[in-house]
Image (cartoon, grey):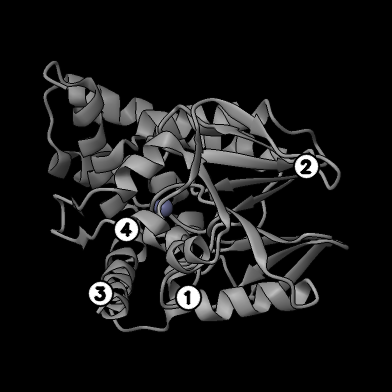
Amino acid sequence: MADQYHLQTRRQLLKAAIGGATGIVIGGPVLRLWAGTQSAQETGTLKLADDLYVLRIPGEANVIVQSDEKGVLLVDGGSAAGSDVVIKAASELAGGRAVHTLFNTHWHPEQTGSNERLGKSGATIIAHENTRLWLGQNITWPWNGQRFKKLPKVAQPNKTFYTTGKLESDIRYGYIPDAAHTDGDMYVFFPTQNVLAVGDVVSRAGWPVVDYWTGGWIGGMVGGAQRLQTLVDANTRIVPARGPMLTLADLKTQTEMYGAIYDRLNQMLNKGRGPSEAVEAKPARDYEAQMGNSDEFVRRAFESLWAYLSPDA
Ligand SMILES: [Zn+2]
């Protein structure tokens, strides 16, 4: 029952993302979700260090695997439909040892599909408190009616935080309070390997879903990309939930891009324009060659301004 639900959700999500982010016909290969910038060779396991890997399973968000003497630590756990494959691949990278720690970079089902299984097996599930709150309630997205069922208690994060935290292994994590993607976004930093996991706060692989219903907004995308710059140096490898790795230079590019789009949308809002007029004005035209058709993104980004800037908000 639960699996069926999640499969359904996954399919709807793919539809929404495919239709939304790229305008590609629904039913195309799942990989096309990642908008042309993620080529076939960017799937498979990517080794970042002897103990640190990225699982890039087709149709799944990126999963970071760190092995230590106690077992496996994951940053995000894939979707419920992909959980078997994710957990098996992760465990194989760590000599068959079990997952002891899972980070949820935010509440979306592409990140939290292994929560139930790992919660039941006694893993520590770490997330921002807002992520736990979203996972504890049913959610319906107003723009497409998509529904997400709350997770059972055992699947909810069992170690939450508000600002920052640190593990015994020196891995650091913290809140990204700009609400770039949701209001529970977090990063995980591996200092020894100089790797920063950032969830869906930034990506080079096409336009994101602007989930203003759970707090994300275009202003936060600018702020989040800016904030991440303060956490990295020129050599830091930045691993997003979708698509290829980024560098500090990419963060600068993203800050400028979303900043320019934000300014254009803000001007339209101030002139009393609506979402359809914003889409027609093509405020993200300059970036479409790289990022794909922007119409759905622009519509949602404009609506996110309403959520944040309208007097009643
Ligand atoms: Zn997401």
Q: What amino acid type should be assigned to the residue bearing mark 4?
A: Leu
What kind of element bears circle 2?
loop
Q: Nearer the viewer, mark 4 or mark 1?
A: 4
In the image, residue 156 lies at what x, y percent? 40, 52
Mark 3 and mark 4: Cα distance apart in space: 12 Å
In the displayed structure image, the side of residue 90 where residue 179 appears, left or right? left
In the image, residue 261 lies at what x, y percent? 38, 34
Say which residue label 3 marks. Answer: 5
Say which residue label 4 marks. Answer: 151
In the displayed structure image, the side of residue 282 where residue 116 appears, left or right? right
Say which residue label 2 marks. Answer: 236
Binning the other alpha carbons within 10 Å of mark 2 as few (below 14), some (14 to 19) or many (20 upward) gives: some
Q: Mark 1 and ligand 1: say if the CB distance to the nearest ligand atom is below 8 Å.
A: no
Q: What amino acid type should be assigned to the residue bearing mark 1?
A: Gly
Mark 3 and mark 2: Cα distance apart in space: 38 Å
At 49% from the left and 49% from the top, the residue drawn is 200
Mark 3 and mark 1: Cα distance apart in space: 17 Å
- The image quarter in which residue 288 lies: bottom left
Q: How many marks?
A: 4
Q: Mark 2 and ligand 1: say if the CB distance to the nearest ligand atom is below 8 Å.
A: no
Say which residue label 1 marks. Answer: 59
Q: Are marks 4 and 2 in contact (CB under 8 Å)?
A: no
Mark 2 and mark 1: Cα distance apart in space: 26 Å
Going from N to C along the chain, the mark reached first, 2 or 1, is 1
Binning the other alpha carbons within 10 Å of mark 3 as few (below 14), some (14 to 19) or many (20 upward) gives: some
Q: Nearer the viewer, mark 3 or mark 4?
A: 4
At 28% from the left and 71% from the top, the residue drawn is 15
Mark 4 and mark 2: Cα distance apart in space: 34 Å
Name the quarter where the C terminus is drawn.
top left
Going from N to C along the chain, the mark reached first, 4 or 1, is 1
Q: What amino acid type should be assigned to the residue bearing mark 2?
A: Thr
